[in-house]
Amino acid sequence: MIGNLNGKVYGFLKNKKLIIMFSVVLVVLIGSAIYITVKGKTSKNASFQTFTVRRGNLNLVLKYSGTVKPLKEATISLNNIEGEVSKIYFKIGDSVKKGDLLAEFKNEQYDLDLQKAALNLQQKQMDYSDINDKLNIRAPNSGVIKDISVQKGDNINNGMLLAKIEDQSHTRVRIPFNQSQIKNIKVGQKAEVVLLDSLYKIEGMVEKVDKSGVLKSNGGLYYYVTIVMNGNYYSQNGNNLAQAQVYTDKGVEYGIESSSLEPPRTVEIRAGVSGVLKEVYVSENDVVSKDQLLFSIQGDGNDSPDKLQASLQSAELDYKQSALKYENLRVYSPIDGVVSEMNLHEGDVLKPSVSYSDTDQPYIKVVDNSKMKVVLSVDELDISKLKVGMPVKITSEAVKDKVFDGVIDSISNTGKVQNDVTTYDVTVVLDNCEGLKDGMTVDAQIMADQRENVLMVPVSALQERNGRYFVLVYNNGTNSNSPNSSTSTSSGRNIRSSNMPGILVPVEVGLVNDEFAEIKSGLKEGDKVILFSRNSTSNSSGNIQRQMFFMGNPPRRQ
């Protein structure tokens, strides 16, 4: 058994040696084939596509496409309106201004509700105003406060006498005239009153003329004329006798007897509601003017101002709601523009309870074509290069030989993911959009970055490995013949090989667009670099085969 095992081991080792020998031979053969291939390709007869490193201006232009839309548009949904279309004032294609009446509906119930709400509000306003007047008592005329009969904190009943106001601004006297005289005397005529105790003359005016006579004991019939004078001439303890004459169109008429001046007239101030006297604002003998606040009362029950104010507010809300429903029967344009769509006809009856299909939805659409916008879906790798305010060039195949100027107006902060690619909406606004129409497809070019007077090479000259970039500098046959010779540079390790027609040099890359890349270090102006074919694998090309030297992907634009 042990002998059999030793035999199997010996056989395995023998086979393993054969496998190793075979592998070594295979490697040598492949290496020789590669060496022969490269030597054939790098012979003096080989031609390579090269590029001479030069300075120039490098622009990073981002190219995207989008659809033209009006900057402002308004779709007016009519689903919430209840009523019959009575009038449509514009048709599709008509220009409208903001605030123009587009369509009008009629609804009799809305009209009645609005009238009822208006009447109710008017009544509540009157009630609230009336109770305020009753709770805050003001002087009905100017005068002197007399006979205050209450004080703060008293319980007040409706109709209770609170005080009196004595009108000392005027003095009156009633002078008798006979029947023949009274025919000539009229209200408003000038009069003169003489105070008999001092013979002081006062100008007055006829205020009232009695039409009925008073029979006196002597058999005479007296007609009294009331004459009013500005000022207070009444004396509480003195002689108040006065005589008067009236200047009529027929001449001067003299009173047939003297009369006493009337004491000043008083006005009673009474409570209009029940409650508690909250405040007294005047004192006895104070001179007050008309509408001056005298007393305030804290009402109770239905006379509470808070209750009436709540009722008034409720009526105001009812009115506003009814007015809003009624006003919604009129549809106005929210913007300046053109009526672009309208799914509405005179005589149509709309009801909010009806479910409309997408094609039957009642609406009016107004668009403002004076300014247009284009929404671009920008790749997440490019979005950080854009800023609001950047200029944009817009072209359209539908408008030949014309470039439209635009500017980035907004950049969305929320990305959209589709097919594992994240994009962001960038809105471009165009001022001059003559010739462009809603829905046209356009191309946009955005100058995202630029460099001036920088070293640059084609992107096809660059190779990438482990995050570093390299170029193959053409040596024009000046390389060392040693296949393993190399030199060191400050930016990395320069690799030379007899298998390659140049030196593999590490470089620092700056700005990159679709065609060229900025070289920050590693090359100098005038160096020649070999370009790599990205697509060709045929030996018929004079270029170096991509399989031999390409070590990774070219850099993305940045």
Image (cartoon, helix red, strand yellow):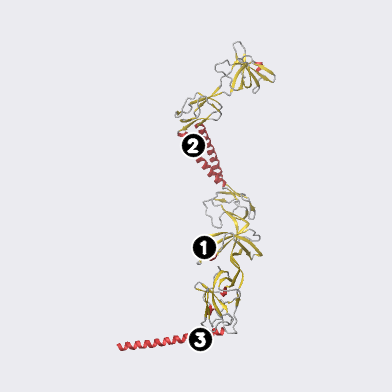
Nearest to the eye among marks 2 and 3: give it.
3
344 left or right, relative to 13: right
The N terminus appears in which quarter of the rendering?
bottom left
Query: How far, Cα to Cα, is label 2 from label 1?
Result: 57 Å
Residue behind mark 1: 416
Helix, strand or loop at label 1? It is strand
Question: Badge 2 local density, few (<14 within 10 Å), some, or many (20+)?
Answer: some
Helix, strand or loop at label 2? It is helix
Nearest to the eye among marks 3 and 1: give it.
3
**Residue 32: image tag:** 3
Quarter where residue 204 is shown: top right
- Residue sitting at 35 percent across and 88 percent down? 10
Q: Is residue 96 above or below residue 295?
A: below
- Asked whether 175 or 450 is in front, the reply is 450
Residue at far right of view: 250
Q: In this view, does 320 lie above or below 133?
A: below
Please, what is the three-letter code of the amino acid marked with disc 1? Lys
**Residue 308: image tag:** 2
Query: How far, Cα to Cα, is label 2 from label 3?
Result: 109 Å
Please, what is the three-letter code of the amino acid marked with disc 2? Leu
